[in-house]
Image (cartoon, rainbow, N blue to C red):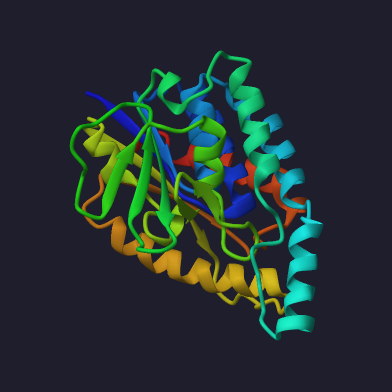
Amino acid sequence: MKKGLCLAGGGVKGAAHIGAIKALEEANIKFDCVGGTSSGSIVACLYACGFSADEMYKIFKKYCKKIKYVDIKNIFELIFGLIFTGKIIIKGLNSGKQIERLINKVCNEKGIYQISDIKMPLAIPSVDLCNGDVICFTSQKFRNNMSDNTIFTSDIEIGKAVRASCSYPVVFSPCPYKNIKLVDGGIRENVPWKELKFLGADKVVNIVFEDEENEVCNKNLVEVAGRSIGLLCRELSNYELDGSDFTLKITSKKVGLLDMKKIDELYELGYRQAKEKIKDI
């Protein structure tokens, strides 16, 4: 039986995916294909490239440092637009180029440059900002698409595929690809288990995130945007999961989209909760 691992998006909560994978490694549970959205795409990419959970954790911490980088050019354009045109131009606080370079660097060391260089079936969805189509980057080439609104392609560098899936509105600028602009895949496909079925998986294990109740909403721009889109993605994920095989929900207290101080805690949380469900997986 061909097993797939599907990793939902969630900002720094992606660290919990790695903790869960560590628990799966210890139980000698392996997967034949993998997919992920947003921060889940980073972990999915590294898994498909053959990195261990320990190696992934070190790389993910480097990724989180890159998120904190603010693109001064974009800030200047925002200020210029307000002063001289009266328009608010928000491309994103971060261009996303550093994340693209980081993923390219670590994957290049394994001889992987294009997503098609990866042997394990891999699916990384993003969304066309103009028409809302899902552009799903895969390591395998397909003649047919899954649906009219989901387009499969393997013609992209691995770093750019991950960058596109991670291009969270406001935080990151839309990612240019050919003649279109792509944004975070979580807007349409936060849990891409159906794509893994299309890639040939017989059973898919989903790892998603669930917040505890009574959250206190933050008021800064990034957290408000993150919370708003997060609510949309959560409802979408609940809808998407209908009909899926098995879902591990990692529950945590309120964690901000960019709350870097929680990385170790989230890793341990993912490890512990996956450990508790190993027999079910």
Answer left or right for 1 relative to 115. left
Q: Is residue 188 above or below residue 246?
A: below
| Viewer-closest of 29 and 101 | 101
Answer left or right for 97 relative to 143. right
| Viewer-closest of 245 and 63 | 63
Q: Residue at x 48, y 34 (%)?
A: 44
Q: Residue at x 57, y 36 (%)?
A: 18
> Residue 133, position in %: x, y?
33, 57
Q: Residue at x 78, y 58 (%)?
A: 73
Residue 151 in view of the camera: yes
> Can you say which quadrant of the picture contains the C terminus?
top left
Q: Residue at x 36, y 65 (%)?
A: 236
| Viewer-closest of 63 and 57 | 63
Answer left or right for 113 relative to 101. left
> Residue 172, position in %: x, y?
63, 57
Answer left or right for 5 relative to 40. left
| Viewer-closest of 61 and 140 | 140
Q: Residue furthest front?
A: 84
> Residue 140, position in %: x, y?
32, 26
How many labels, in total?
A: 0
Q: Based on the displayed image, in which of its 4 quarters is residue 89 positioned?
A: bottom right
Q: Is residue 225 above or below residue 112?
A: below
> Can you say which quadrant of the picture contains the N terminus?
top left
Q: Is residue 157 above or below residue 234?
A: above
Residue 268 in view of the camera: no
> Residue 192, position in %: x, y?
35, 47
